[in-house]
């Protein structure tokens, strides 16, 4: 959905309501909003529940581009509607006859500038997205490597603790064997004294 809003307001504070300038909102819609009406132009004004118009100035112009199908451009309004509907598909090097006014050439030039800027913007955004993805991948790889290093350290520490525990068990077994041997020697000494 496209929107163009044109807003004109009063020139100074305190100006009488009847002297206020009109305010219009123009909505260019790529899709149909009003399905039970074939008209492509709708003008809405501000009214209350009884149908009384607040002001004869201003309102909303709703233009449904999908319903606009004029093959032959006959009015300035039709020229602009056709431009809004078909402008992005036009070749600015070979414009159709209905585009050969100064205003339409300027509009096409503006559209081309926006399109080029859009392309540059999207290229820039794609590059930024690529760089973000690369930084994310690099961060995830670094994090995975760090986790693997920590897991390897924990595994090495656990293996070292197991070796220490086995060594302590061997030392304890040797000490127990020495203690049992000492007990046997002392028993033998006691048996000799009796």
Image (cartoon, rainbow, N blue to C red):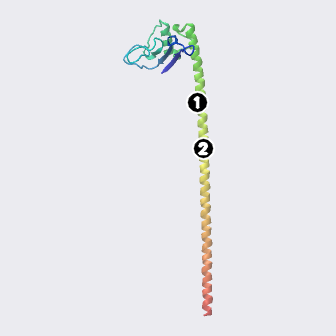
- Please identify the quarter of the rendering in which residue 10 is found: top right
Nearer-the-camera pick, 23 or 173? 23
Residue named by callout 2: 141
Nearer-the-camera pick, 101 or 2? 2
- In this rendering, is residue 186 above or below 115? below
Furthest toward the left, the residue is: 36
Give the percent coordinates (x, y) of residue 121.
Answer: 59, 25
Secondary structure of residue under mark 1: helix
Please state if 140 lies on the left or on the right of 25 as rendered.
Answer: right
Furthest toward the bottom, the residue is: 194
- In this rendering, is residue 124 above or below 14? below
Q: Residue at x 62, y 51 (%)?
A: 149
- Please identify the quarter of the rendering in which residue 110 is found: top right
Residues tagged 1 and 2 counted as in contact (Cβ below 8 A)? no
Q: Counting other residues with Cα less than 10 Å from the Cα at mark 1, is it few (<14), some (14-19), or many (20 or more)?
A: few
Q: Is residue 136 visible?
A: yes
Q: Residue at x 58, y 19 (%)?
A: 114
Give the percent coordinates (x, y) of residue 94.
Answer: 56, 11
Q: Counting other residues with Cα less than 10 Å from the Cα at mark 2, is it few (<14), some (14-19), or many (20 or more)?
A: few
Q: Give the distance between the C-alpha atoms of the residues marked 1 and 2, in whole angstroms.
A: 22 Å
Furthest toward the top, the residue is: 74
Q: Which comes before the other along the chain, label 1 or label 2?
A: 1
- In this rendering, is residue 1 above or below 78? below
Q: Is residue 64 visible?
A: no
Secondary structure of residue under mark 2: helix
Q: Residue at x 60, y 74 (%)?
A: 173
Residue named by callout 1: 126
Give the percent coordinates (x, y) of residue 117.
Answer: 60, 22
Give the percent coordinates (x, y) of residue 125.
Answer: 59, 29
């Amino acid at each position: 959905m496209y929107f163009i809003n044109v807003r004109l307001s009063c020139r100074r504070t305190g100006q009488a309501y009847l002297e206020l300038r009109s305010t219009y909102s123009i909505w260019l819609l790529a899709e149909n909003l009003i399905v039970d009406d074939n008209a492509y132009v709708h003008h809405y004004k501000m009214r209350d529940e009884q149908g009384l118009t607040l002001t004869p100035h201003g309102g909303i112009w709703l233009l449904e581009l999908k319903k606009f199908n004029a093959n032959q451009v006959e009015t300035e309004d039709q020229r602009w509607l056709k431009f809004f509907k078909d402008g992005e598909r036009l070749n600015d090097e070979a414009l159709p006859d209905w585009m050969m006014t100064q205003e339409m050439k300027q509009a096409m030039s503006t559209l081309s500038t926006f399109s080029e800027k859009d392309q540059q913007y999207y290229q820039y955004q794609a590059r930024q997205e690529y760089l973000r993805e690369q930084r994310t991948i690099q961060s995830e790889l670094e994090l995975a490597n760090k986790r693997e290093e920590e897991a390897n350290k924990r595994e090495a520490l656990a293996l070292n603790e197991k070796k220490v525990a086995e060594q302590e068990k061997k030392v304890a077994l040797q000490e127990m064997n020495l203690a049992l041997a000492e007990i046997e020697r002392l028993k033998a000494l006691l048996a000799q004294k009796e």
